[in-house]
Structure formats: structure tokens, C-alpha cells
Amino acid sequence: MNSLFKQIIFLALTFALLIILFQNIAVPFEGTKTQAVPFNKLVQLVEEGKIKSIELKTDGAISGTLEDDSLVTTRAIGNESLVSTFKEYGVPLEAIRKITIEARGNGGLMNFLSILIPTALPILFIGGFLFLLYRQAQGFSSKTFSLGQSAGKQMNYDGAGKGDVSVKTKFKDVAGVKEAKEELMEVIDFLKNSKKFTDLGARIPRGVLLIGPPGCGKTLLAKAVAGEADVPFFHISGSEFMELFVGVGASRVRGLFQKAKRHAPCIIFIDELDSIGRKRGIGFGGAHDERDQTLNQILVEMDGFETDTNVIVMAATNRPDVLDSALLRPGRFDRRVVIDLPDIASREEMLNVHAKGKPLSPEVNLRRVAERTPGFSGADLAHLMNEAAILSARRNKSLIAMEELLPSIEKVILGPERKSRVITDKEKKITAYHEAGHAIVAHIMPDADPVHKISVIARGEAGGYTLKIPEKDKYLHSRQEFMADLAVSMGGMAAEKIIFNEMTTGASGDLRHASSLARKLVTRYGMSDAIGPVSFELEETNGFSSLPWEESKNSYSDHTLEGIDTEVARILEEAYNKAKEIIEQHISKLEIIAKKLLEQETIEKEEFEKLMQADASQR
């Protein structure tokens, strides 16, 4: 594109230069009135004294200038001089002496350009345009023939081989995921000492599927495997197989696997496998057909590996439920390694890794930071440490302290503070009571997460927030915990109703969360006594996706759907009534906390618990 842009600029400048030359050379000649006449007419004009000057060229062309500066042109007769010719025609000598006769050759640059430019300019312009089209077509043709080539990027550990980029990642660079590392150590042993396994009749695993939420380190772990095994690493995203033309994806798959076989032992890593490995089905408009062809080629190539071919395919996805069943059968992706979000110990280990190269204050307690970041992925923790470093630099500090780490947690969760947001006193008062309502209900409900901070300072899209962080990582949740969460969500709206006798749009986010959770209780978790332990989630059948004009069909009747809606509304009403009851019982504490928020805008955990200490016996 850069070369094409330069060509266009060059042609444009050339065209502009030719236009300027044409205007300065050709236009003056075109502005003078010229008339071709016979020679005897020129003689007559000379006799009448209407000719000022005559220009005679070597080729016999004659140009005469009249009194009004117009021109007449003709050609000389005979080989005699022009004066002798005029005398023969009977022109008086006095009339001949009045005119200026000048002889000039035909090689003048100006005359040449005045003839050349009007003729050559259109030819040059059209020729340049056609040349540009030819170059574009030639480039498109070369790109078309290269579409089927593999787009995979080859990387080798410590620069070994011919890779463009070196893989220097080792297991020591990947914190946490202890079980995943142990599972993958066998893969490394296969690549290093394959003969030990083949002598015993063991088959080398052809595929390893890394499953986990975004940001948990799947790609980093795959690179670490290649680094530990010291083998070439081919990294490609699933979407890179797809192209405008049908058949390109399958061709790229063949090219990638052929290249990998030439560099065996090696690892092929396909990131975002779900973009190309979705369940095959009925396509619309040809899009599914191309993806299906590409997926079929991947299946064929994985089946085509010989038992002694040391090529292992690793892939990563956060949507294993949408993958085609043919990909997941034994013989293709033999092993599935699940990488969960890190627990508190893994988070502390990851924070130590991401803290390398960042000067920390001696009072920094990364264990405390890990406790306040449940649900954070490895990428979130890296982002947290980076935000803390940026905040320290903004404050002109040489060390990163807890004063930067703790606010950075809130920034990652909720977004940046918006202290410049202008709100009225009434809106600020409503926000204070709203957040106080959330905090009081969370403090009183025994199964709710503890409150760590309350603020009326806007962050992200929220006008205020109540930060609740669980004391430990949870993998199972009970109905009581869900009901406590629903009551806390309704606490802000209940406080608004009690104090101001009206509700505002500030509770819209809480209602959205509560409605979604209540519906999951009924349709997904089977925690409704009225509906029973039944799951009503829709599932794809046989991998066939619906056509655009087909409506999705529920797996239950309209009567059941009505019962679900009724039960969801009942659960939400129960949660609202519980929140309202708690706030009415602690109305004095609501007033105290709201006024404190209006005074200082933020209340930390320790101060909040002191304010609520008088009600501790009621919990």
C-alpha cells in the first residue's frame, strides 16, 4: 500500500507539472487569432500596408503579423527570396520597406513544446493510468496465489532453527496452574524422548486442548511447553485460516501441517479454536461451508499423522461447548487441560511474577492484594500491577505502595474515578442513601460477602458503589447465598423508597443483575420449589444451527414459561421485602452512614464496621 501511494503521488505531481507547462506555452499561441490564407492574399495585405512583420521559416512557412496582432499564415512560392517574389508580384518597394522580414529555423524549443504538449499530455495521462491499473492487478494476482500459503508464525526456542522469533518462555515464567504444568510435562517428555514411549508401544498424543476463561494463561502455557521442549513453535489464530475466497482455509491448513512435518519435532498452537472448530451444520450464504471445509481439513491432517511423527497440536478455547464432537474424540485432541481462574495462592504467586522489574515499597503485602482480588485472571493481575505503577509515576513516587495497589483494584473492577462529574446535591444525597442501603443489607445478611468500601464517587458507569469481596474463593454456591445476593442488590432501591418514597434509575443496574440471577435460579440451577429441579436452558441438537428466518423453539410449554416468569417475579419480590425489612429495622444506621458518605464521600471497611457495631448482636 505504501508503494502504491508513492506511485499515485508521483503521477499526480507529473500531471500537475505538465498542466503548468501547457498553460505557459501552449495557451499563449491558442489565445492569438490565426488565419491561413493563399500567398496572393499575403501580397495584397503587404500592398495595403496592413502587415507589420513577416517571419519566414526554413521549410517555406510564412507567418505575417497584422496591425491588430492577428496572424496570417501561408507558404512561399518558388526558391527566390521573399523580397524578389513581392517585386515580381508588383508590390511597391516602399511597401516592402515598411515591413520587418525575419528568417527563423524550425528547431525552437518553444515551438516544439507547443506542438508536443497538447498531443503528448493525454497520451501520458492515459498511459500512466493504465500502468497503475496493471501494477495493481499484478499485485492482486501475486496475493491471490499466496492466499493458500500458511499464515502460521514459526518461533524457535533460543533462536534454534530458522524461526523469525525465539520462544524464551519457560515454566518458571508461568505462575500458578500447577496441575496443568504437571499434565503437560508428559508432552514435553514425549517430544524430548519419544523413543522411550514408542518402544513400549505407547502412542504419542496428537492433540492437547487447553480450556479456560480468557486471560488465564493458555497461550503463555503453550509457549512454555515449546520452550521447555526446545522445539519449533508454530502459532496461529483460528480466524487466520479464513479468507475471502472459498478453499483458502483448507489450503492454509495443509500448508501449515506440511511445514510442521518438515520441522518435526515441533508444536502447532491454534489459538481461539472455537472460531474455526464450531459444530458443523447447515450454512447460510456460504460462510459455514468455508469453515466446515477448513475444519474437515484439520481433522484429516490430524488423522494423517503417523505414530512416529513428533508433531503435537495444541489448541486453546474458552468455549469448549461449541466445538465439534469430531475434534474432541480420542486420536485427535487426546488430552484436555483445564485452566481455571487462580486461587489465592496462585494469585499471590502471579503477583510476585508481575512485580518483577517494579520497585515495591517494603510495606507492600501481596498476600493482602491477592485476598482482595478473587475472580481475577492472570491478565487482570498483570493489568493491576501496571495500573499501580502508572499511578505511582503520576504521583511522582519512586516506589509502588499499597496506596497505589488498592485503588488500582477498584479501577480494574469498576473503572476510573470520575471526580469531575457534576451532580446536584439531591442526586448526591440519593446516591448516599442508595449505597448505604446496599451496605447495611450486606452487613446484616449472614450469607452475603463482607463490605470493603462504600463510595459516592462515580466510577465507570456507576454513580457510586459498594465494594463487596468474599473472604475466600468459592466454587459452590447455595440458595441462601444467592438469596442474600438478591437482597443486597435490592437494598439500594429499598432505601430510596423508604427515605424518598420514590425510586430512581440509579437502581437499573441492580435490577438487571437481580433479574438475571433470579431467572438462573429457576431455569438453570433448579432452586425453585414451585418449578422443581429442572433445567430449561436451550441446547443445540446435532450441531445444526438455526437458519436466520427460523425462530428458536423452547423445550417447554407456554404454561411452564408463564410459571417461570411468575416464580422469577416472586423471588425478586421476596428479596426486595427482605431488604426493606432490614433497612427499616436499622433506619438510624442508614441515616448515620448516609450522612458520613455526604461528608467524606468514602467509607472504608474498618470505619463501616465500627458504625455498624451496635447492631452486631442482631446478625
Image (cartoon, rainbow, N blue to C red):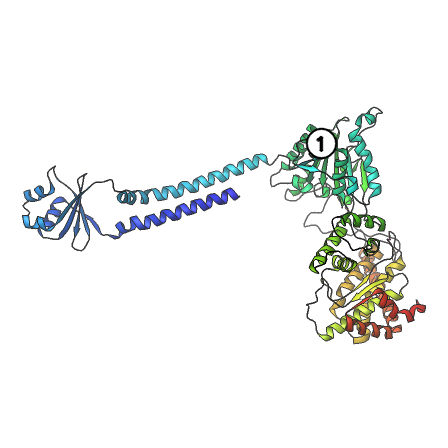
**Which residue is identified by label 1?**
301
Looking at the image, which residue is at 6% across and 44% down?
87
Looking at the image, which residue is at 50% across and 43% down?
4
Quick check: 454 above or below 329?
Answer: below
Q: Which residues are magenta?
A: 469-477
Query: Which residue appears farthest toward the right when viewing the image?
Result: 617
Residue 494 visible at all: yes
Q: In this orientation, which residue lies closer to the viewer: 364 or 117?
A: 364
Q: In this orientation, which residue lies closer to the viewer: 5 or 578?
A: 5
Looking at the image, which residue is at 64% across and 34% down?
251
The 10 Å Cα crowd at callout 1, few under 14, some 14 to 19, many 20 or more, is: some
In this rendering, position of residue 439 left or right of residue 56: right
In this rendering, position of residue 258 left or right of residue 337: left
Quarter location, residue 206: top right
Residue 340 picture location, percent across and down = 81, 47
Q: In this orientation, which residue lies closer to the viewer: 547 or 15?
A: 15
| Element at label 1 | helix
Quick check: 534 above or below 454?
Answer: above
**Dominant secondary structure, magenta:** loop
- Quadrant where the C terminus lies? bottom right
Residue 300 picture location, percent across and down = 72, 32
Q: In this orientation, which residue lies closer to the viewer: 523 or 204?
A: 204
Residue 388 picture location, percent across and down = 74, 56
Residue 543 visible at all: no
Residue 359 picture location, percent across and down = 75, 52
Q: Amino acid at mark 1?
A: Glu
